[in-house]
Image: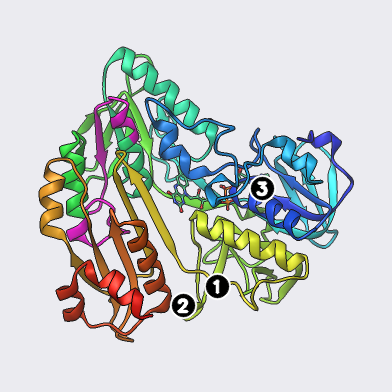
Amino acid sequence: MAAAAALPPHAEVLVVGGGLAAGYVARAAVEHGLGGVVILGEEPVVSYERPALSKAYLFPEGAARLPGFHTCVGGGGERQEAPWYREHGVTFATSAPVESIDLARREARVKGGRAITFGALVVATGARALTLSDPGLPGGDLPGVHSLRSVGDADALLADVARLKGAGGGAVVIGGGYIGAEVASGLSLQGVPVTVAFPDASLLARVVPRELGAIYEALYEAKGVRLLKGATATGCVPGPDGRVAGVRLGDGSVLEAGLVVAGVGARPNAELLDGQAKREGPGRGGLVVDSSLRCLGPDGAPLDRVYAVGDVAAFPLSSQGDVIVRQEHVTHARSSAAYVAAALAGKPPAPRYEYLPFFYSRVFGGVSWVFYGASPPGAVAVPFGLAPAAAAAAEGRASKFGAYLLDPASGRLAGVFLESGSPEENEAARALAAARPAADAEELRAAGAGYLLAAAARL
Ligand SMILES: Cc1cc2nc3c(=O)[nH]c(=O)nc-3n(C[C@H](O)[C@H](O)[C@H](O)COP(=O)(O)OP(=O)(O)OC[C@H]3O[C@@H](n4cnc5c(N)ncnc54)[C@H](O)[C@@H]3O)c2cc1C
């Protein structure tokens, strides 16, 4: 690990951001013999597999801890601890937040430290968790109110879990998306009484159709987690000790809370290139890149050897007519990082960056889902396995169920959601979502989960 003060004056390839994608840039750079790579990361540790933070990091026993989950273990690669970077000729400066980038001078400046010039730039600054203070909720920054993005956040959360276990009391998770659902599972496994409050009509509403969300709701409730649907948090309330003691809801009621975790989304860290590169949407979005992941200037022309990867990149998704999307998912972070490192080494693996959207989650030890592909506008969901899954969920167990998503415009399969699939079925879901075969809702309904292996065999 290099201290910011010991940085070289110049990097052939400067990676700004030392998170998940940066670790995979380093791995691919080494594989392709790309030298002169310098990574500047603001966290005090080298790259790690961030998804562990809301899963095994929160386990009461056998919890994941660094260095166990440094990249690239999640991608089936070597565990890259700090010495790995030194041994492979990559300079990785930790605790080195970049405060400015000047594309005209091709120079980045580390906060309170020195400037470094670069040949190529890879922006890998990811996204930050939105906090309750972002929309200005009163009490959103009280002690005991958490968000979860970094190992530091997870350690702070666990310290408060220990305090709560000693003092008694429950936790409120705000947000019913996958991070909220995973954190609720982790806290519940810790023995903390948990309430999840969210404004949507069903759990995981942005990921799964409502009928499927209902099964996860039954499962969470069977595990003792209380769910408050249609509940909007309007602020946090302090107790006599100044720590959070409750969450105020839209109807004026107050939920008691010894601990609050906000799982309310993330925002891309794209500000470093404000005015120098194009951002998605009205100023708050990611860095817009072309199909080779090159950042675009304010005029829309590709910038010379300036790339964005991972959560911060807003890229054209070819399978959906080149609609510009950000994907806050590890598979994209890994594959975009690998693509750019190969391109910089003069060996782009394909003429353009192709990506099949993939989401996954694991909770309560045995509940595990995957979602491959997309849910295009007006998609028709064809669920399967719901009745047995509902019965199992009521007993706190997961069984196989899912949904096929049909694109009504093309009559083709656009996405597959699958809970508790076998490795072969998960792979079939991936292959089918990638191939997008013509499919008929009645045929899918009749075949149920059996369609997966049968149809994948016909591809
Ligand atoms: C709790 C949690 C659970 C998740 N679970 C899943 C999951 O189950 N499945 C899945 O597919 N995805 C999951 N994700 C998403 C996944 O972790 C991200 O998609 C992935 O980490 C993106 O990689 P990245 O390198 O783009 O961003 P990050 O990993 O966030 O790395 C960005 C890094 O840049 C640093 N940085 C930012 N600004 C600067 C600056 N100015 N100077 C220097 N450094 C800077 C940040 O501190 C950070 O270290 C999860 C994310 C979280 C937070």
* Label 3 beta carbon within 8 A of ligand 1: yes
What residue type is disc 3 on? Gly
For the residue carrying disc 3, how many other residues have a C-alpha within 10 Å: few (<14), some (14-19), or many (20+)? many
Place residue 453 in its image quadrant.
Answer: bottom left
Callout 2: helix, strand or loop? helix
Instruction: Give the CA separation, mark 3 to mark 1.
Output: 23 Å
Residue 17 tag number = 3
Tag in front: 3 or 2: 2
**Residue matched to label 2:** 319
Apparent side of residue 183 relative to residue 90 in the rendered image (left or right): left
**In x, y percent, where is residue 102?**
79, 56
* Label 2 beta carbon within 8 A of ligand 1: no
**Residue matched to label 1:** 354
CB-based contact (under 8 Å), mark 2 and mark 1:
yes
Magenta part of the chain = 186-212
Q: Residue at x 67, y 56 (%)?
A: 123
Instruction: Evaluate whether residue 98 shows in this view.
Output: yes
